[in-house]
Image (cartoon, rainbow, N blue to C red):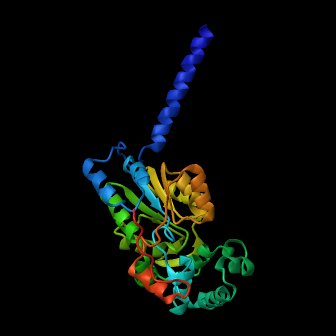
């Protein structure tokens, strides 16, 4: 009997310690008590998420303020190249090559790679065929080949790319949603492997976010210049979760993504939503009851309409969906 009482007491203490550890792990590192949304904040969030299904919106409105992580390419924007949807990393390389913005020592190599991309189609497969190790990954490749640029040059290039090639294709509903989250007391973050850190900073500015609320492929900076030394972990897959843990000071409460590279980040958030998901993520979302939202005609911007008009594979822009 005495042994039973001691065992019960020990289990009770252990349970309490586990609960305390869970609270500590889930509590914002920078303070705060996980407060509920005010009526005003709920209304702001409701108005900023009218593009969601009602069920998804109800889940969203039950959240407490915290960090909300967004993938970039395909989630916040649908970048185009030659009138068709394109990988944003591919579009950035084309932009850099066309304008001869890669430093001289790296320019010829990137131009050759770009020619292979155009000839063989898939930039990721081209890199795997012609490179080894880390260099077989498109995203680190681009960041590392910006070495030699000053930070001011990198910022200027990123600003030009975002204004000319990205801004026209940011989904209007997502722009509105990010703004609503911020106004409702959340911390929106952009977490992507698609383009270098400097570009992601400019996307954040365009969306009205602090430029330090971004995570992207990055190399070390020394004496004001970018170097080839890549800073791990790579922000894709589980690397996104690691980077969030290292850089975000409040609890992650929500996440949005469009591909398998976002899966770990989505699984780490209490509220997750698949935006324009590819086949693998759509399958996982359906099997696990995650909300799925597609920003096709609803997300069209003026830039999308122009791109569709340019493309022979598309007809006129779709009519907005009725909800």
Measured from the top left, where is residue 35 in percent x and y?
A: 33, 43
Position of the N terminus, as image quadrant, is top right
- The residue at the far top in this view is 1
Tell me which residue sits at (62%, 77%) in the image. Answer: 141
Seen from the viewer's position, the closer of residues 251 and 184 is: 184
Measured from the top left, where is residue 3 in percent x and y?
A: 62, 11
Specify whether 180 is left or right of 99: left
Measured from the top left, where is residue 223 in percent x and y?
A: 48, 77
Q: Would residue 319 be visible to someone looking at this image?
A: yes
Quarter assignment of residue 187: bottom left
Specify whether 121 is left or right of 154: right
Quarter assignment of residue 194: bottom right
Tell me which residue sits at (46%, 43%) in the image. Answer: 26
Residue 71 versus residue 170 in the image, above or below:
above
Measured from the top left, where is residue 102 in percent x and y?
A: 54, 87
Specify whether 106 is left or right of 130: left
Residue 3 versus residue 265 in the image, above or below:
above
Q: Would residue 237 be visible to someone looking at this image?
A: no
Position of the C terminus, as image quadrant, is bottom left
Tell me which residue sits at (55%, 52%) in the image. Answer: 267
Tell me which residue sits at (49%, 75%) in the image. Answer: 78
């Amino acid at each position: 009997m005495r042994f039973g009482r001691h065992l019960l007491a020990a289990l009770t203490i252990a349970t309490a310690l586990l609960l305390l550890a869970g609270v500590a792990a889930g509590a914002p590192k920078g303070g705060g008590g996980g407060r509920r949304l005010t009526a005003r904040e709920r209304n702001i969030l409701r108005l900023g998420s009218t593009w969601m299904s009602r069920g998804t919106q109800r889940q969203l409105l039950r959240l407490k303020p915290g960090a909300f992580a967004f993938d970039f390419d395909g989630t916040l924007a649908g970048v185009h190249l030659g009138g068709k949807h394109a990988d944003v990393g591919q579009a950035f390389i084309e932009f850099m090559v066309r304008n001869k913005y890669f430093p001289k020592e790296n320019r010829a190599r990137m131009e050759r790679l770009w020619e292979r991309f155009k000839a063989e189609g898939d930039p990721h497969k081209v890199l795997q065929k012609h490179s080894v190790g880390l260099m077989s990954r498109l995203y680190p490749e681009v960041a590392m080949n910006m070495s030699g640029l000053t930070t001011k040059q990198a910022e200027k290039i990123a600003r030009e790319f975002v204004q000319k090639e990205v801004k026209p294709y940011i989904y209007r509903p997502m722009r509105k949603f990010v703004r609503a989250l911020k106004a409702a007391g959340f911390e929106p973050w952009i977490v992507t492997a698609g383009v270098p850190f400097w570009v992601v900073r400019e996307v954040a500015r365009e969306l009205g976010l602090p430029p330090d609320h971004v995570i992207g492929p990055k190399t070390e900076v020394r004496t004001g210049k970018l170097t080839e030394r890549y800073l791990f972990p790579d922000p894709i897959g589980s690397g996104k979760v690691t980077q969030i843990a290292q850089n975000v000071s409040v609890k992650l409460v929500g996440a949005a993504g469009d591909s398998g590279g976002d899966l770990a980040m989505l699984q780490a958030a209490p509220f997750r939503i698949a935006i324009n998901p590819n086949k693998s993520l759509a399958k996982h979302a359906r099997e696990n009851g995650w909300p799925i939202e597609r920003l096709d005609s609803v997300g069209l911007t003026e830039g999308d309409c122009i791109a569709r008009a340019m493309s022979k594979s598309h007809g006129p822009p779709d009519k907005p969906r009725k909800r």
